[in-house]
Amino acid sequence: MSESDILNIGGTSFKRRRKGVVDLPIGSLIDYQPVTMTVHVRRGKEAGPTLLLTAGIHGDEIIGMEVLRRMLKSRKLQNMKGDLIIVPVVCMPAFLSRTRYLPDRRDLNRLFPGSPEGSLGGRLAATFVQEIVPHCTHSIDFHAGAVGRPNLPQIRVTPGDSEAVEMAKAFDPPAIIESSVRDGSIRGHLAANNVPALLYEAGEAFRLDPSAIRYALHGIYGVMRHLGMLTELPKAKKPPRARTVVSSSTKWIRASQGGIFTSQKGLGKAVVPGDRLGILADPFGRKETPVISDMEGIIIGLSCEGTADEGDALFHIASTKNAEKAEEHIQHSDAILEEHADPLH
């Protein structure tokens, strides 16, 4: 077996057709307990792409963790080509403390590529960059909205990354958003190293939304088929595709007045300028202020909080033409996915 057929992570070597787990050492916490990053490796029978799947960069975003847990149990991986590297919880300290951020209140997704002599987060990022990134040819990173701010399942891609755009189409989400990368993010680091990267956003923190999980599993398999890692489904078993909404710009509609907030539009709904999205009411019953859309598009995120201060973000809208048609496509896509849900993942 040639050296190129060996995949080495953290001093552990994996031959073809092998699978296993590596716990990469990161550091220790205040109680002397070690911090590790658990990495799962699944190697196919033949050479092919190496797809990296990550979740838990923010410790409260558990949807991706559940998606990757199910992937690790999937029977569909038995005959795949290429390799999967799966990291269900990138930031274990944040996950253990049930919070978005590291113990020093820093955001791990602003610390890449990190430093081996830096903070705990910097060391974590550096270990990820040194041990995992060099092996990967493609990537999907899984995220969720904040508490009380759910997201419509969507893929975010870097403008100009044509290979990532094709991956996003194969993922077949309700919406694809062209979104520039942020300094220090894992997506930015991967893009700088010519690794096409998708970012999946769906649901909200601390919640497991069945629809968001279905879209994610469906999307991973779609990307793997697009990359040639899995064989195409026979036509008889292939669900019909619904047209994905593609948007190059988004905007938050904010509260013009503080008060009791009632939403009148949900995720995936079409809006046009002048549409009433909800109301902000004086808690003492003297006045109501409507929340009005000033653009055409689809709601991809919203606030579920019952109160708002002036300036709070209420509705996140992705700009698109023919918004009503786009809403129909999303509803059709939901119905297709639910009808063809695979209990064996």
Image (cartoon, helix red, strand yellow):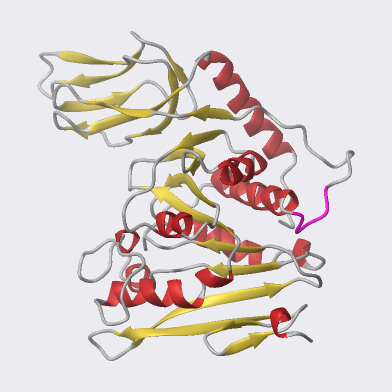
Looking at the image, residue 187 lies above or below residue 247? below
Position of residue 66 measured from the top left corner of the image (x, y, whole percent): 54, 60
Residue 237 among those drawn in magenta? no
Give left or right: position of 177 versus 83. left
Q: Residue at x 47, y 35 (%)?
A: 177
The residue nearer to you, when weighing 46 against 172, is 46
Q: Residue at x 89, y 39 (%)?
A: 236
Q: Quadrant of residue 96?
A: bottom left
Image quadrant where one finds the C terminus: bottom right
Position of residue 339 measured from the top left corner of the image (x, y, whole percent): 73, 37
Image quadrant where one finds the N terminus: bottom right
Q: Residue at x 13, y 17 (%)?
A: 285
Give left or right: position of 329 versus 92. right
Q: Residue at x 68, y 73 (%)?
A: 42
Looking at the image, residue 123 lies above or below residue 101? below
Looking at the image, residue 175 lies above or below residue 190? above
Q: Quadrant of residue 280?
A: top left
Position of residue 245 measured from the top left corner of the image (x, y, whole percent): 55, 27
Looking at the image, residue 204 lies above or below residue 316? below
Position of residue 314 measured from the top left corner of the image (x, y, whole percent): 29, 30
Q: Quadrant of residue 12?
A: bottom right
Q: Point out the stretch of residues depicted in magenta.
A: 228-232
The residue nearer to you, when weighing 163 against 328, is 163
What main secondary structure does the magenta stretch of the protein show? Answer: loop
